[in-house]
Amino acid sequence: MPSNRRCEPASEADVAAQPAGATAHAWSVHELGDELIVFDPRTDTTLRLNRTAARVWRLAMAGLRPVQIAEQMRREFDVDDARALGDVLTATDRLIELQLLPGGSQR
């Protein structure tokens, strides 16, 4: 069944966000409910980040380290410390692999 949700542009900060140490290029980011649709014009790739990955990406783009992101996620999603940190590390590793975060993010 098709969804009636529209893909709305994200904030200016998301569209041109660049994490520290990133090479210069901009992503086109659109909100789809709690998820994000990210288009990377450099690689001509479109990605869909689920609610958790979208939140991790936004917090990482704001300059938070994975441990800080895990603390935030623990509070927001009511999960234990180990689960939050594991999920954040998995997400950040994948986001680095997809070139949505710079490699070598500090843990």
Image (tube, grey):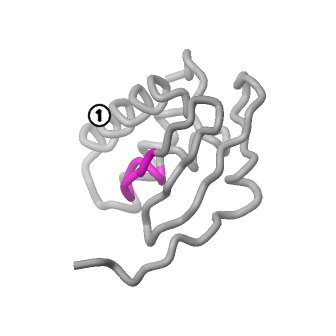
For the residue pair 18 and 42, the one nearer the viewer reads as: 42
User: x%, y% of residue 107?
Assistant: 49, 23
User: x%, y% of residue 90?
Assistant: 33, 31
Identity of the amino acid at label 1? Gly
In the image: residue 10, left or right of residue 107:
right
Q: Is residue 16 above or below residue 9?
A: above
Q: Is residue 105 above or below residue 29?
A: above
Label 1: few (<14), some (14–19) or many (≥20) C-alpha neighbours in 10 Å: some
Total marks in image: 1
Magenta segment: does it hold 51?
A: yes
Q: Secondary structure at mark 1?
A: helix
Q: Is residue 60 above or below residue 97?
A: below
In the image: residue 37, left or right of residue 85:
right
Image point (70%, 52%), residue name: 15
Image point (78%, 28%), residue name: 24
Q: Toward which corner of the image does residue 47 lie, by quadrant?
A: top left
In the image: residue 92, left or right of residue 24:
left
User: x%, y% of residue 53?
Assistant: 41, 47
Magenta segment: does it hold 29?
A: no
- Residue extent of the magenta highlight: 47-55
Image point (49%, 57%), residue name: 36
Q: Is residue 74 above or below residue 69?
A: below
Residue at image mark 1: 86
Q: In the displayed orientation, state which residue is furthest to the left.
A: 1
- The quadrant in which the N terminus is found is bottom left
User: x%, y% of residue 61?
Assistant: 64, 42
For the residue pair 85 and 29, the one nearer the viewer reads as: 29
In the image: residue 101, left or right of residue 62:
left
Image point (41%, 26%), residue name: 93
Q: In the displayed orientation, state which residue is furthest to the bottom.
A: 4
